[in-house]
Amino acid sequence: MIEATSWRGTIALPDGTLADLRAQLGGSLLTPADAGYDAARTIWNRLIDRRPALIARCISTTDVVAGVQFAREHGLVLSVRGGGHNVAGSAVCEGGLMLDLSGMKTTDVDVSRRTLVAGPGLTWGELDTATQAHGLATVGGIISTTGVAGLTLGGGHGWLMRKYGLTCDNLVAAEVVTADGRRLRASRDEHPDLCWALRGGGGNFGIVTAFEFRLHPVTTVIAGLLVFPTTRGRDVVEVFRALSLEAPDELTVHVLMTTWSDGTPVIAVALCYCGPEASAESVLRPLRTLGAPMADTVRRMSYGELQTSLDSTNPAGGWYYKSGYFDPARGQTREALAATLDHVDFPDPSILSRVVIEGLGGAMARVPAEETAFVHRRAPFDLIVIAGGLTREQLPRNAAWARGVWKAMTPFLSGGIYVNYLDGDQGHEGVEAAYGPAYARLAALKTQYDPDNVFRLNHNIAPSHLDSARGRLDNPARHD
């Protein structure tokens, strides 16, 4: 017998009940006494330290259906792990049933149709390896260990977003296990309302067990970093601002303020140019007006290499984020970006902390806001304040620093938030800000597809008749 957490309290699950679940699974069922349990519950953000009563390591959609039905039958708290990279740690529940999909790694590339069917356990590094073998890619995250499922369902910023749109814009169809255990195909022709919700609405509507993506011909890019001393900060952000707003779709450019390996504060431009190589020099010429950088890694490289180039700056450890989109009306000004420089005073120790301003626009901005559940199409930039490399003891000071930078920048922000950067401490107000004008429609669809809020351990959109606060996570990084 094992004790588990239901939505109404602690319950006892007899050994026979566990044996029945094991018999239904093609994968394995772990309890806290089993080898591999601690590894299975450990995710990228090491500040998350929850202990599920059960971990079902799924290897098929049939396993996922069995897990969902078991959780419903016993009223268990249910969480779902794909890549386990989300900063809020919603993959892991306390005392309930965690469905671990990390073993579901299908990569079925159809070269003639330029599509890929991807399993929910894939990381972007694994997906890129499969598609790059054919000279193809879809829009993915900038860290190879990021999970495909979470990034896609939250929208999907990436190096190719200005040329090919967001990750969710390239989602053609999905196989979904709903809260009642049905297996549905969601596309423009089948359950189109569910397809709309999955393109930016997070994991609120079901468990996606297969993603079908549109692929694009991508082999090599011009990419890398230009690193400057912070004394050049205002020049750097002004060139970045102008270039980002005027660049062709083939160029995505970000600026980041961080510390060098010896602790020296620096400002860097990170870029990816995915266009004709003969045009690269003229497109990047404005950056060369900044003069000689401290370091210059910009060169021709494979797209796959670019996708792993920042991995060392994002290792597993303690992480805390604050984020927000710049207001289209005020956020394009020199004043807005220059203001960021006035508030970057890095805490010590926290060598992985940084402030990032992502340049947006291009193809992602031309998709009508109502076409997907991702609505923040017109923002010129996205601000991410990252406190990283943390222990629990370092968290309070570093989290306070991140909140301070973010608060100082709020006059230039729209109030909208990228859901994939949403930490667990922003509550329902943060969720409403993330989904914006799509929230009401998403809540109606939640009521249709998950009326009991079975899938609530996420940035939760509660059904209309339930209290939204019930979806809130117990996050050790919260500072209310």
Image (cartoon, rainbow, N blue to C red):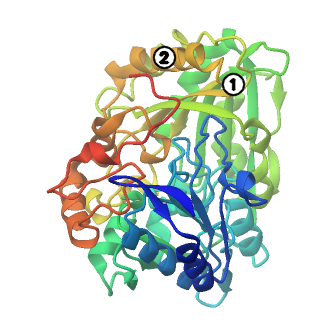
Q: Quadrant of the N terminus?
A: bottom right
Can residue 367 be seen in this snapshot?
yes
User: Which residue position holds label 1?
Assistant: 391
Q: Closest to the observer: 84 or 471?
A: 471
| Looking at the image, residue 176 lies above or below residue 249 | below
> What x and y, as percent, mark residue 170?
49, 69
> What x and y, as percent, mark residue 172?
46, 78
Decide: few, some or many residues near mark 2? Use Cα within 10 Å; few <14, some 14-19, many ≥20: many
The structure residue drawn at horizontal position 35% and vertical position 28%, both measured from the top left corner, is: 413
> Going by the image, does 339 lie left or right of 129?
left
Q: Secondary structure at mark 2?
A: helix
Q: Amino acid at mark 1?
A: Thr
The image quadrant of residue 373 is: bottom left
> What x and y, as percent, mark residue 206?
40, 70
User: Which residue position holds label 2?
Assistant: 405
Q: Amino acid at mark 2?
A: Val
